[in-house]
């Protein structure tokens, strides 16, 4: 759909400031924006911060139940800071991007130790805390304290790219710098909380990636992308790179209604979570019949017990942002279990405790389907 756009506005590259833009966004948000999200209607910086971290790269619908359960277990910043990392990871399990949970825990400890459990209101101080970037710092400061600071998350990048007809991938520094100039210049003198929420709401509910509702948009007459029939072209996508592939064989070792788990290193894939022991050095595909050196399995099991039976399970794939992980799994039942006191990173877990254990989503799904039939 094409329309006549206000070219003087769209071509205003020397001075990005325009109070009518923020006025339109604020008015629309007050009338049509989201007002019932569980982290709204509060200036509690802890709750604002928690929601902003959870919403990074995750949809609102997925975040809400995690947010509510997290607050039930960690109702205050001090409770979160004092909690063991295993408990934090367990309540994050399934939400993905687990570095967020590690940074969240570290950030809570920093704020308690350095700011007496009160988040600073200055975005320049917030950005120094673990897991808080420039846009997130601005959102926390705006929603908690009314600080006049600009955000530029994925939703806002999409809105600005379309409204101002910005070419190039928004993640590229040159393009991102231009968008930040827009974001800073367009900040209103008053009502920054409503304006900030309005930008988020526009991107999340109207100016969506695949099905934008342009006719309902309060700034459609300003939109260069709509006027030039480029709504579905902008913002430009990141140049695609072929996903790399990784292969792993996981061992589901069971005995007496328990399963053997291994704690992952604090960094890297699934850092800090519990997962299944892996058979090192195997490069396998998705063939139904897994060809393995039978002695490799026996060697891997020697510290844990005596094998009674083993069964190859159906392989599956889990896709990450930058690679595909091909997972083959072998269920191994032990006839006798050895003492693993010396294996500090291994532990046995009761099968009924698996639903609440800090497990990566694909591992939890595998175990629940296999062992608990849920």
Image (cartoon, grey):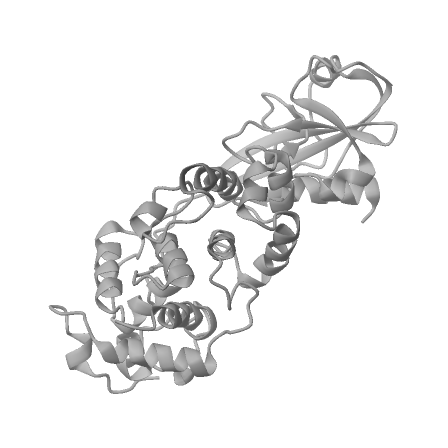
Report x, y in % for residue 198: 40, 72
Q: Measuring 88% from the left and 27% from the top, which residue is drawn there? A: 256
Quadrant of the image occupied by residue 65: bottom right
Camera-side residue: 291 or 244?
244
Quarter of the figure with the N terminus? bottom left
Residue 273 in view, yes or no = no
Question: In terms of depth relative to the viewer, which is nearer, 225 or 240?
Answer: 225
Left or right position of 266 against 162: right
Compared across the picture, whether 151 is left or right of 32 comes to left
Closest to the observer, 103 or 110: 110
Which residue is at the far front? 116
- Residue 233 % position (x, y): 34, 67
Question: Which residue is more in the foreground, 82 or 130?
Answer: 82
State the image quarter where residue 284 is shown. top right
Q: Is residue 314 visible?
A: yes
> Where 96 falls versus 289 (above or below)?
below
Residue 271: x and y in percent read 55, 33
Residue lying farthest to the left in this orientation:
14
Q: Residue at x 61, y 30 (%)?
A: 248
- Number of labels in the image equals 0
Q: Is residue 237 above or below residue 199?
A: above
Horizontal and vertical percent for residue 187? 27, 68
Q: Identify the residue shown where x is 23% and y is 83%.
A: 5
**Displayed quadrant of residue 182:** bottom left
């Amino acid at each position: 759909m094409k329309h006549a756009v206000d070219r003087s506005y769209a071509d205003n590259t020397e001075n990005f400031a325009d109070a009518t833009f923020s006025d339109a966004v604020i008015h629309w948000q007050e009338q049509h924006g989201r007002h019932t999200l569980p982290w709204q209607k509060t200036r509690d910086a802890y709750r604002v911060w928690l929601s902003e971290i959870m919403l990074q790269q995750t949809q609102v619908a997925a975040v809400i139940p995690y947010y509510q359960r997290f607050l039930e277990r960690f109702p205050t910043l001090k409770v979160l800071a004092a909690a063991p990392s295993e408990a934090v990871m367990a309540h994050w399990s399934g939400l993905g991007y687990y570095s967020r949970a590690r940074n969240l825990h570290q950030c809570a400890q920093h704020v308690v130790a350095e700011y007496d459990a009160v988040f600073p209101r200055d975005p320049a101080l917030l950005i120094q805390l673990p897991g808080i970037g420039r846009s997130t710092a601005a959102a926390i400061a705006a929603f908690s304290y009314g600080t006049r600071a600009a955000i530029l998350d994925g939703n806002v990048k999409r809105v600005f790219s379309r409204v101002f007809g910005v070419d190039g991938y928004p993640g590229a520094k040159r393009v991102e710098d231009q968008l930040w100039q827009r974001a800073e210049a367009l900040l209103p003198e008053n009502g920054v909380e409503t304006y900030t929420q309005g930008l988020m709401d526009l991107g999340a509910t109207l100016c969506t990636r695949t099905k934008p509702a342009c006719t309902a948009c309060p700034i459609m007459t300003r939109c260069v992308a709509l006027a030039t029939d480029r709504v579905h072209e902008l913002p430009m996508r990141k140049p695609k790179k072929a996903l790399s592939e990784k292969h792993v064989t996981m061992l589901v070792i069971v005995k007496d209604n328990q399963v053997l788990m291994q704690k992952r290193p604090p960094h890297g894939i699934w850092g800090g979570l519990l997962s299944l022991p892996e058979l090192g050095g195997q490069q396998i595909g998705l063939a139904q019949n897994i060809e393995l050196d039978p002695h490799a399995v026996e060697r891997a099991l020697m510290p844990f017990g005596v094998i009674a039976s083993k069964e190859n399970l159906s392989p599956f794939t889990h896709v990450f942002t930058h690679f595909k992980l091909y997972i083959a799994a072998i269920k191994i039942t032990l006839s006798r279990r050895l003492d693993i006191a010396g294996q500090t990173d291994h532990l046995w877990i009761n099968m009924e405790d698996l639903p609440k254990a800090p497990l990566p989503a694909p591992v939890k799904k595998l175990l629940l389907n296999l062992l608990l039939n849920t």
